[in-house]
Amino acid sequence: NSDTKKIFQECLFKSIVGGYAGFHCLTKYKNSESFDLEPKIDFLEDPNQYYWDISAKHTCKVDGMYAGFKTRISRRKFKDTYGEEIETQIGSDANSQSSSLMFADDDSITQIDDFEKESYETTLYKLSDNSTLKEDDFKKLEEIEVDGNKIKIKDGVPVNVLQKRKLIDYKIIHRQIAGDFILEETEFPSEEMLPVIFVDQKSYFTKQGQQITRSFFKDVKDSQKFLNYLFTQSAYLIKISRFDQFMAPRKCVAAPDTTNIWREPSVVKGVLP
């Protein structure tokens, strides 16, 4: 239900024009009468509303420690969703000189969806069947007692612990924030990858480590001329896309100029005299 083809096409278009784009994945209920959650991919029309961790190394910045996006919601819808008490406590920034720094006005409120990785210590076990399990999964194994010894059962087979070691693992916390309030806080069902994807067109890094995004048209001296050229060439390709051949009397194509026009199918059409 995500309409991913349209989303990917929009991201490609926005990255070509603006240098980068983004999309995100959230879990939502299948319908208003369901308790089942399903992943849903969506995107924002304005990529500037996304943010990522500058220390991320992955091309799509999914390995950072945080990422998120902000959206605008009307005060009426916000009040229906989160209650009038919270809505009235979020003041208006209508007097702010910059609309980009305005988080609320008389008609709307900015809501932030923030995803942050939180670390915790766990134990990794290597079992006698050469499999590995983390502490939470290891504790879920069935346990039986034989001759006073406790033995774990995995897939119906007794297993022993060969090795174990401590490691740092991560969980992703999804917070919905408006004003000074955390509206909702849940654990996102992913251990490593953040669900906010950076779509890069062709960026580069400076000597200071700053990433500079660049659009497809950045190096074009006259971008409008280049766009017009692309449209003209596209129309021309459509025009000559027919390669049909027709039979015709030689007298109809006897003139040199007519012969040149009809001889090659790549010009307009082809004819067999």
Image (spheres, helix red, strand yellow):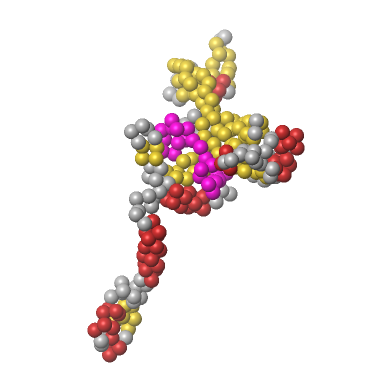
Residue found at the far right of this picture: 84
Which residue is at the front of the view, 95 or 272?
A: 95
Q: In the image, what residue occupies the spot 65% across and 41% down?
A: 94
Magenta stretch contains residue 164: no
Magenta stretch contains residue 43: yes
Q: In the image, what residue occupies the spot 46% across and 52% down?
A: 13
Residue 48 sits above or below residue 17 on the image: above
Which residue is at the front of the view, 266 or 138?
A: 266
Q: Where is residue 151 drawn, in percent x and y?
A: 54, 16
Residue 207 sits above or below residue 150 on the image: below
Residue found at the far bottom of this picture: 251
Which residue is at the front of the view, 132 or 81?
A: 81
Task: State the extent of the magenta-drawn residues as a range.
Answer: 39-63
Residue 49 sits above or below residue 63 on the image: below
Q: Where is residue 194 drawn, in percent x and y?
A: 51, 35
Q: Where is residue 245 drawn, in percent x and y?
A: 33, 78
Q: In the image, what residue occupies the spot 26% across and 79% down?
A: 260
Q: In the image, what residue occupies the spot 44% across and 51% down?
A: 17
To which quarter of the image does residue 213 belong?
top left
